[in-house]
Image: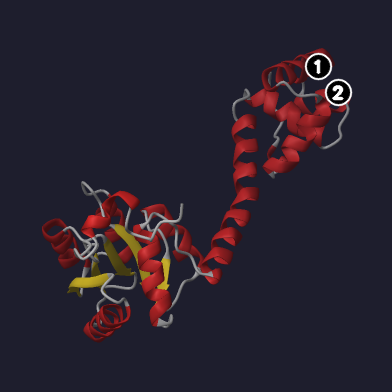
Amino acid sequence: MEHTRGISASSEENCGQEQPIPAPIRVSIVDDDPMICQAMALIINTSSSGRVTVISTAQNAADALKHAQKEHPDIVLMDLAMPGISGIEATAKLRSLPNPPHVLVLTSLSPSTTVEHAVEAGAEGFISKTDPPEEIVDRIIGAYSGDPQFNLVSQRQLITRLTASQPMTRRNEARTLLYSLTDRERQATLLAAEGYTNQEIAERMYVSERTVKAHLSSTCDKLCMSRVQLARLVERADLDTTQTEPGID
């Protein structure tokens, strides 16, 4: 049986009664340029068909935090380039409040590090000051619904940053494993990775070949790796193998 949207089959007697209108999404705008605040408020209030309303504006992060604590907006549009407390720091403070607002970064510039740092602070997306009015409204509504709001540029920059950070993370993980070894185990491992034989390593470390074998065997057991895997670990760690100074065992 087909139903009319918004009216159930069992409530035809209520036809003629007005249906409740959802409360508009309440937005606070933060930008050190009052003209930007006024322009964004005008765009949102006139383009959202009553779905979104701007309840306050602020020209600095301190005032923005006061507004948020007093007015409890659903969404805060946060500029990043502000004097005093930065937009990123303010975002983190807003997100730490009880029942925190969603935060969308309001910017005309989004360098790659900004995207990453804003996300780490708790921002859920970006709105460009040059976006079309309907897109700005759609992003606000989407963020209110819990959907991340990143434009294509921000998505690419975030992916690029994450991809770029992977090699550094792998390097640091490899270094952590190597530094979990004793100095002599690590020294023998680095020399072995350089292609030296056990005898050559013994000569460079001024120890017996048997001691070298013991160091390498202990290393393999600790890290659960073969000598080939150890060589790849050293390569990934990108350590300065010239620092393997000989010493007394």
Depth check: give the residue in front, 105 or 227. Answer: 105
Q: Is residue 205 visible?
A: yes
**In screen coordinates, is 57 left or right of 51?**
left
Q: Quadrant of residue 90?
A: bottom left
Which one is in front, 94 or 193? 94
Q: Position of residue 29 (x, y in %)?
A: 25, 72
Q: Is residue 107 above or below residue 18?
A: below
Cα–Cα span, label 1 and label 2: 7 Å
Residue pointed to by mark 2: 198
Left/right placement of residue 194 relative to residue 120 reads right
Q: Residue at x 62, y 49 (%)?
A: 166
Give the image location of residue 174, x and y in percent. 65, 36
- Please name the residue shown 27% across and 83% down the image: 46
Quadrant holding the C terminus: top right
Residue closer to the observer: 110 or 143 = 143
Type of amino acid at the residue the image marks with label 2: Asn
Q: Is residue 207 above or below residue 66?
A: above
- Amino acid type of disc 1? Lys
Q: Residue at x 30, y 82 (%)?
A: 43
Under circle 1, the secondary element is: helix
Q: Are marks 1 and 2 in contact (CB under 8 Å)?
A: yes
Residue at mark 1:
213
Residue 4's disc number: none
Does label 1 or label 2 sit earlier along the sequence? 2
Vertical order, 95 against 129 (above or below):
above
